[in-house]
Image: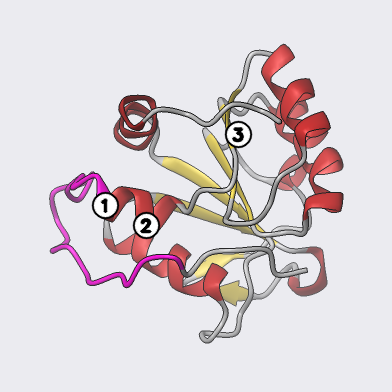
């Protein structure tokens, strides 16, 4: 199994990188991906939704793209809300577009994809929630313009 990432590295990722592609973002406010993306937006992160089934629509005020390769600029973090078996092509796209971090949500683990991404120079964080870690580590808003919003914890995960 791929090694867990220490808190200091998670903190460095969440404070250094501001542009996050949320792969598998749902337009349903009840889904974990929607709540996490909304939280990250409130914290000042720039979010690019990626979901081929709703590409072209607007979610959380952002245009949804079909793939990472369609984004107008490369994401720094690729935050994956897909089942583990769907991570390898996402990792390949993350490598191709020049992302810095491949991050998979709770219960999303694919060691083959993680190794491929790490071998290509990406930081890999698996089975962690961006929003929960942001909150847990006490990282304030990255832009300084939004007040921290409550987040109840282990709400991330694969969505399809």
Q: Say what secondary structure mark 2 lies in.
A: helix
- Compared across the picture, whether 61 is left or right of 134 comes to right
Does label 3 or label 2 sit earlier along the sequence? 3
Q: Are marks 2 and 1 in contact (CB under 8 Å)?
A: yes
Q: What secondary structure do most residues of the magenta stretch adopt?
A: loop
Name the residue carrying label 1. Answer: 136
* Mark carried by residue 74: 3
Q: CA distance from mark 1 to mark 3?
A: 27 Å
Looking at the rendered structure, the secondary structure element under dot 3 is loop
Q: What are the residue bounds of the magenta stretch?
A: 136-154
Residue 55 is situated, as x and y percent measured from the top left of the image, at: 75, 67
Label placed on residue 132? 2
Callout 2 environment at 10 Å: few (<14), some (14 to 19), or many (20+)? some
Give the answer, above or below, for where 152 lies relative to 13: below
Is 126 magenta? The answer is no
The residue sitting at 38% across, 39% down in the picture is 18
- Residue at 67% x, 19% y is 118
| Viewer-side residue, 149 vs 109 | 109
Label 3 crowd bin: few (<14), some (14–19), many (20+), radius 10 Å: many
């Amino acid at each position: 199994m791929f090694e867990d990432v220490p808190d200091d590295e998670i903190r460095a990722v969440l404070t250094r990188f501001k542009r996050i592609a949320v792969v598998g973002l749902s337009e349903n406010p009840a889904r974990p991906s929607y709540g996490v993306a909304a939280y990250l937006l409130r914290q000042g992160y720039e979010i690019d939704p990626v979901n081929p089934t709703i590409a072209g629509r607007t979610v959380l005020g952002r245009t949804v793209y079909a793939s990472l390769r369609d984004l107008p600029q490369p994401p720094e973090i690729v935050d994956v809300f897909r089942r583990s078996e769907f991570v390898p092509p996402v990792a390949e796209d993350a490598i191709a577009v020049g992302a810095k971090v491949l991050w998979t949500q709770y219960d999303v683990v694919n060691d083959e994809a993680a190794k491929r991404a790490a071998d290509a120079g990406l930081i890999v964080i698996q089975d962690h929630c961006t929003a929960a870690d942001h909150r847990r580590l006490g990282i304030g808003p990255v832009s300084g313009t939004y007040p921290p919003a409550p987040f109840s914890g282990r709400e991330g995960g694969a969505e399809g």
